[in-house]
Image: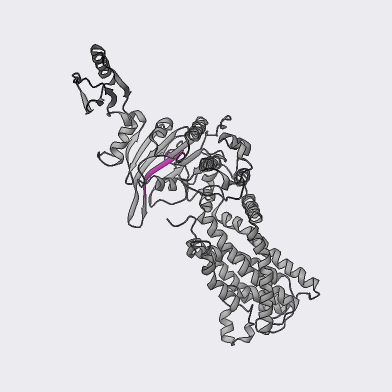
């Protein structure tokens, strides 16, 4: 059945040492990652890091200058006809004829697919049933994005590529999309998504890669990425002029009255702190304790202030 | 968010078979026809425009010494509708779909590149065919109809010409950045095709060397084949019967075929699916 030998036939997506150039500018400089069925892989990075350039090759819309991309073992460009029935793509921005209704748009797309889902079911999943008869040009931005998503998922794809799926969505629509992605993965699909939203990555992704200047500079599970980063404690101290207690191994990032502490041992530091506050009858207003987060890791590498071994 | 997604078969990476090209093209064409019907201005223009044009062309052609019998008129209608309706409308349609990011989206699905271009072009080609039929019916109604020498050659001209317009329009989108710009970017081909194809000025009225050169322009073989079959007249104005028409047909058929090949190669190289960033 296969014309080429995939290195790992059980992988949904396999990208090996991908390079892409636009003239003299090298937008993607050796990116590798793999996604298994039933897994969400999130590609993070600031604008211009090369995320969309990577996705375009995965989607089969552009060829690689070097390196290889395999979708379900097949090349998305040269074997496009075999890959496409299994691939669902949501572009960062794409258009729809404004004078077709939501229902007509989905029916038209369904007729181009090998195994389309019922249109009514697709509409229900993105909460657009009540908008079936409305022309696309009359939809709100969020409704259009949800229609985009319904189109991407209409062919029951086994591999789903979502370029910034929730950018510009209101919080409720964003939750709808998240639930949909979780359903997809529970059904065994592999999802590759890009996002600017760290919460989105934390909520959805099994594994995360952070890109900077065309390279993946940080990759792993959330726990792996956060490991080695400090937990954060924040609170506001009543103005009593009392110095903070002696907290071994804790860095005071911001001093009183608005305090931010960084610690590798969140539980013991908190215990000491709460004991001290109780002893002196202090209010630690707005007390927050956060474990080491993706955000810290992201901010540290995404802007290039911290060098990392890729 | 009530229904859950059905599980996909992940048991193997067997990619299986896919549906038919005809169904995909028809789906796209049906949507495009619906869009054309909803755009009243475009719909009216595409029907009324050619009627006005044909009247003008008939007047110019007659004043240039072309005999305006019913058969000549139908042959002219084929050329006029192809270049002024099909070509121009196809350029604007392709550019509009590209600039509104519709082409890029359609490329993310199961449609092949050729199917997207063809499906988008079908309504325009149908309108073109309809207009030639309307002219034919008008000619019959006016009692100007005379039996053609051959029907296959004009049909080949119409079919080949239709596909050629799709290909040339696709190539022309590469230097047409907006729908408005199409008014100018289509001019060179429209002018060359109408002025030098024997549509307005009979090629037989030109010096033979010039006429021979013009025979190699893209629309000329369409006019030549149409006149051979419908009027029974070669490009030099010589009357022929069915056998004579076919004897004169190989060169224009080859020129038409050549333009189809060259046009397709160029269109595939230069066609852009997304706006310039």
- Residue pushed farthest top? A279
Q: How many marks?
A: 0
Q: Is residue A72 visible?
A: no
Residues B130 and B25: in front is: B130
Q: Is residue A169 above or below residue B141?
A: above
B221 to B172, vertically: above or below: below
B197 in relation to B265, above or below: below
Residue B198 spot, x, y in % from top left: 63, 79
Residue A142 in view of the camera: yes
Q: Nearer the viewer, residue A112 or B50?
A: B50
Residue B143 occupies which quadrant of the picture?
A: bottom right
- In the image, A41 versus A283, the foreground residue is A283
Residue B10 placement (x, y as % from top left): 52, 34
- The range drawn in magenta is A7-19
Q: Quadrant of residue A308?
A: top left
Is A229 magenta? The answer is: no
Could you say which quadrant of the image residue A35 lies in?
A: top left
Q: Is residue A9 magenta?
A: yes
């Amino acid at each position: 059945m296969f014309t080429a030998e995939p290195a790992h036939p059980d992988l949904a997506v396999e990208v090996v040492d991908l390079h892409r150039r636009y003239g003299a500018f090298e937008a993607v400089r050796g990116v590798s990652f793999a996604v298994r069925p039933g897994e969400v892989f999130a590609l993070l990075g600031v604008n211009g890091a090369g995320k969309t350039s990577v996705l375009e090759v995965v989607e089969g819309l552009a060829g690689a200058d070097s390196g290889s991309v395999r979708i379900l073992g097949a090349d998305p460009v040269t074997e496009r006809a075999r890959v496409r029935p299994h691939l669902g793509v949501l572009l960062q921005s794409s258009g729809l004829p404004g004078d077709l209704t939501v229902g007509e748009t989905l029916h038209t797309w369904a007729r181009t697919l090998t195994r389309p889902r019922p249109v009514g079911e697709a509409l229900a999943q993105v909460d657009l049933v009540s908008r079936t008869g409305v022309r696309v040009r009359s939809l709100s931005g969020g409704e259009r994005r949800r229609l985009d998503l319904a189109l991407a998922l209409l062919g029951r794809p086994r591999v789903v590529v979502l370029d910034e799926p929730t950018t510009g969505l209101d919080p409720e629509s964003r939750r709808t999309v998240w639930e949909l992605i979780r359903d997809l993965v529970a059904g065994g699909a592999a999802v590759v998504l890009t996002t600017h939203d760290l919460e989105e990555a934390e909520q959805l992704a099994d594994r995360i890669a952070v890109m900077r200047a065309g390279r993946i500079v940080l990759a792993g599970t959330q726990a792996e990425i956060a490991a080695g980063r400090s937990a954060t404690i924040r609170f506001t101290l009543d103005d009593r002029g009392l110095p903070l207690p002696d907290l071994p191994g804790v860095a005071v990032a911001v001093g009183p009255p608005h305090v931010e502490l960084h610690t590798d041992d969140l539980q013991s530091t908190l215990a000491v702190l709460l004991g001290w506050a109780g002893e002196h009858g202090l209010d630690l207003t707005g007390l927050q304790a956060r474990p080491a987060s993706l955000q810290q890791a992201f901010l540290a590498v995404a802007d290039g202030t911290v060098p990392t071994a890729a | 968010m009530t229904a859950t997604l059905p599980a996909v078969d992940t048991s193997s990476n067997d990619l299986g078979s896919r549906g038919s090209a005809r169904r995909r093209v028809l789906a796209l064409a049906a949507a495009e026809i619906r869009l054309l019907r909803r755009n009243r201005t475009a719909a009216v223009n595409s029907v009324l425009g050619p009627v006005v044009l044909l009247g003008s062309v008939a007047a110019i052609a007659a004043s240039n010494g072309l005999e305006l019998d019913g058969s000549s008129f139908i042959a002219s209608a084929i050329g006029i509708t192809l270049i002024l309706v099909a070509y121009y409308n196809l350029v604007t349609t392709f550019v509009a779909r590209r600039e509104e990011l519709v082409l890029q989206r359609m490329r993310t699905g199961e449609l092949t590149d050729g199917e997207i271009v063809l499906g988008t072009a079908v309504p325009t080609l149908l309108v073109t065919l309809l207009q030639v039929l309307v002219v034919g019916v008008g000619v019959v109604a006016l009692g100007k109809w005379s039996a053609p020498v051959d029907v296959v050659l004009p049909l080949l001209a119409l079919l080949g010409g239709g596909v050629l317009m799709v290909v040339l329009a696709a190539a022309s989108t590469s230097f047409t950045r907006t729908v408005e710009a199409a008014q100018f970017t289509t001019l060179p081909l429209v002018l060359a095709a109408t002025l030098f194809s024997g549509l307005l000025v009979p090629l037989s009225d030109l010096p033979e060397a010039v006429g021979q050169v013009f025979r190699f322009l893209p629309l000329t073989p369409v006019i030549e084949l149409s006149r051979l079959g419908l009027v029974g007249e070669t490009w030099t104005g010589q009357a022929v019967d069915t056998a004579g028409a076919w004897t004169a047909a190989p060169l224009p058929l080859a020129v038409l075929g050549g333009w189809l090949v060259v046009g397709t190669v160029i269109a595939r190289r230069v066609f852009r699916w997304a706006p310039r960033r």
